Image (tube, rainbow, N blue to C red):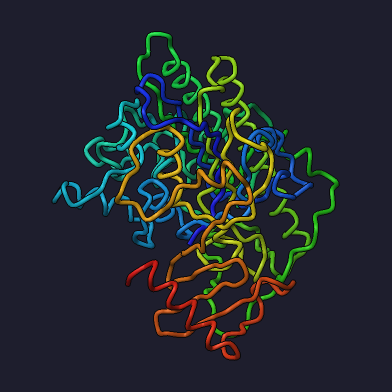
Amino acid sequence: MRWILLFVCLGMVPAAVSAAERPNVLLICVDDLRPELNCFGKSYIHSPNIDALAARGRIFDRHYVQAPTCGASRFAMLTGRYGPSDNGAIFKRAAQIAKDPDSVSASMPAWFRQNGYTTVSVGKVSHHPGGRGGADWDQESQLEMPHSWDRHLLPAGPWQHPRGAMHGLAHGEIRHDPSKMDLFQSREGPDSIYPDGLITDEALRQLEQLSDGAAEQPFFLAVGIIRPHLPFGAPAKYMLPYEGITLPPIPHPTKPSGKTTWHKSGEFMRYNNWGKDPNHDAEFATAVRKHYAACVSYADAQVGKLLTRLDQLGKRDNTIIVLWGDHGWHLGEHAIWGKHALFEESLRSPLVICHPGLPDPGVTTRSIVESIDIFPTLCSLSGLPQPDFVDGVSLAPIVRSADAAGHPAVSYAKAQTIRTDTHRLIVHRDGYVELYDHRGDDGETTNIAEENPELVEAMRMQLRQRVKG
């Protein structure tokens, strides 16, 4: 269940080091980010800052998330464990902590906090930006991740509260009725006319505070960038690289036949789309794809600001940097515009790990990895005790050598799936199976389960061994 975008700058740190000697961690989470980046082979995407980070790190080309939805995917990444498949996963964990704290294992930020780190989150790191519940997601009494963060922040500005910022368009526009909010938008102005500009500004302030000479503890700073989440709004300057260009054709753009996890793109279709359907209007489909790309470039610019400030503060050489996408997103493949399916496009996301001491920087690994591997990996690279309660494994061997072996990836939604080097198996709750061969060009368009019963059973057993239920 892992198709995630993750970039991490890692140092090879021995376990026997004091807290003050341990590296800092900068975790950058980007919402709804496919591997739609220049450094992942999409040459038409303008992503110079992430590309520069990737050139100094390890690029995980086959990173898969646990679930094709924000809350469940972030639960898995932040705990290192398989979990619920719905967006309420993190709040369910918080409720269990309130009921029986000893029954819940530590989250990744809690583990770092327990081991001498100052932990801070800014923006959308857990499911709700700012990490709180309540009607407007700002109630101090309703924490998504108790005991995890020293500070968890969301500067709402003109969007009034975290709920307003989550789907905010330019100059404080808040989503009330999605059908009255434009699907995409591009307005003239600085980065701060959309919520991510304010999130980044606050993250820069936190980075400066955490890097102050008087600070005695290493820091774990997580920054959650909202775009390219719907609606696709970004300052007009980020549309400029896409004006007049021809995008490559959408691969396998038709609705699949037979039983699959296909859906009607409900989240996408809720917005004002001016009566157009991208599955039947090629010009509109191109416009949607270009506005998504502009949001990727906007997110890339925020990453650039963080990396520049890290350099200015002299912290780059002692900071592990992780760039992670919380899941993929269909841009017309299988006639889907959104996530929530168990196809490759929903489950694969970017992941990069970067550090000056990393061997062979800029080299891509084709080894399959999962989001739950991030927690143990960061512990290995930071010299922290290895948690014995996680389902993931450390990726330190792959960080050291791009040829090191990975492992099959498991994901789940309304069904369960396992991805190996060559195949994907999807098992539905009623027992129906889909099997796809990734060694050819068909992608996930031809279900070959019926003619391969032995392979189906072997992969089904492998899936059962990984995830119960």
252 shown above or below 86: below
Left or right? Give the position of 291 relative to 86: right
Residue 291 in sight here: no
Q: Position of residue 430 (x, y in %)?
A: 40, 84
Query: Residue drawn 37% across and 67% down?
Result: 467
What x and y, as percent, mark residue 301?
64, 32
Task: Indicate the quadrant where residue 439 lies.
Answer: bottom right
Outermost residue toward the left? 99
What residue occupies the far bottom of the structure in this picture? Answer: 451
Q: How many marks?
A: 0
Q: Residue at x 78, y 44 (%)?
A: 242
Q: Is residue 99 left or right of residue 338?
A: left
- Which residue is located at x 84 percent, y 53 percent? 246
Image quarter in which the C terminus is found:
bottom left
Taking depth in this image into account, of 323 and 144 the one nearest to the observer is: 323
Q: Nearer the viewer, residue 148 or 19?
A: 19
Task: Residue at 63%, 45% (x, y): give it.
Answer: 59
Q: Nearer the viewer, residue 349 or 240?
A: 349
Can residue 447 be seen here? The reply is yes
Q: Position of residue 224 (x, y in %)?
A: 48, 38
Q: Position of residue 73 (x, y in %)?
A: 44, 54
Residue found farthest to the top: 214
Q: Is residue 21 left or right of residue 333?
A: left
